[in-house]
Image (tube, rainbow, N blue to C red):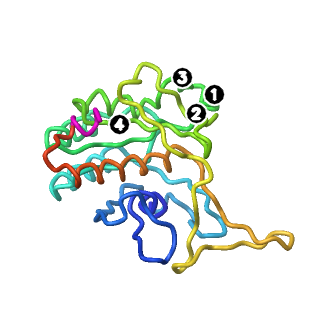
Amino acid sequence: GSKVARVAAGARDGQGAVGIAFGANVLAIRADQPGSCGNDTPDNAAQTCLFFDNDIARGIDLAIASNATVINLSLGGGGANLNLRNALTRAANAGIVVVIAAGNAGDGSDPNIPPDQPDPFATDAVNAGNGNVIIVGAVDGQGQFSGFSNRAGDFAASYLTARGEAVCCVYDDGEVFVDTVDGQQLVTLFSGTSFATPQVAGAVALLAEAFPNLEATEIVEI
C-alpha cells in the first residue's frame, strides 16, 4: 500500500521518489484481511494479501464520506459482489473517479481470465461506475505494452496505460533499501498494473486540482 501511495503522491521533499501528484493528500484505507499479508519486509517484498469485497466496499464508502477526489484500487481477481458494485455506483454518484488495475494475467497465467480482456474485477467496476472508472494497463519504460498486463479488449473506451515495469523502490526507515547479493548492491524495482494504476490516479488528482470545474466523467473522458 505504501509503495502504491508513493507512486501516486510521494512528496517532493528531497527525501526520495516523487509521486505524480506530490502535493496531494492521501487517505489510506486498509482493506486487506488482517494477518493475510505475511512478512512484508524490505528484504522479502512478496505479497500474499487477501481482500474481501465487503471490506473494499466499506473503504469506498469511507472515501466518499471523506470527500475524496479519486480512489485508487490496485487490486484484482474475480468479479465484484453486489455490495462492492453498489459502493462503486455510490462513488460515481458522488463525483469520484475510480482508477483500477487491469490485471496481470495478460501472459495467460490465469486460465480463468482471458488475457485480451481486463480482470473481471475491473470490468465489473466499469459497469457499475457510470463513466467514472478508468482501467489501467502497463507498459515498459519505452512505452511498449507489458507482456503480463491484461489488454483492453471490449473496454478500450475506459482503458489507459502507464509505466508498470521497473518502478522504484523499496524504502526502509525512509531510505532506499539496498540489498547485497554476491557482492553486488541491488535495489528492488516493482512491476505490475498495480504500479501503473496510481500514476493515472495521480494524474486525475492533478487534473482535478487544475480544473476544479470539471465533472468526474469529463476528467475520465480527457
**Residue 95 vertical position relative to residue 108 in the rendered view, above or below:** below
Q: Nearer the viewer, mark 3 or mark 1?
A: 3
For the stretch drawn in magenta, the main secondary structure is: helix
Amino acid type for the residue under numbered disc 3: Asp
Amino acid type for the residue under numbered disc 1: Gly
Q: Nearer the viewer, mark 4 or mark 1?
A: 4
102 left or right, relative to 206? right
The disc at residue 134 is: 4
Name the quadrant of the C terminus. top left
Range drawn in magenta: 217-222
Amino acid type for the residue under numbered disc 4: Ile
Residue at 47% from the left image edge and 21% from the top image edge: 153
Considering depth in this image, is 90 or 211 the residue closer to the camera? 211
Crowding around mark 4 (Cα neighbors within 10 Å: few <14, some 14 to 19, many 20+) is many
Instruction: Provide residue 115's location: percent of width, then percent of height.
Output: 57, 25
Image marks 2 and 1: residues in contact by CB distance under 8 Å: yes
Residue on which disc 1 sits: 108
The secondary element bearing badge 1 is classed as: loop
Image marks 3 and 1: residues in contact by CB distance under 8 Å: no
The disc at residue 116 is: 3
Instruction: Provide residue 73's location: percent of width, then percent of height.
Output: 38, 47
Residue on which disc 2 sits: 105
Considering depth in this image, is 171 or 65 the residue closer to the camera? 171
**Residue 170 vertical position relative to residue 102 in the rendered view, above or below:** below
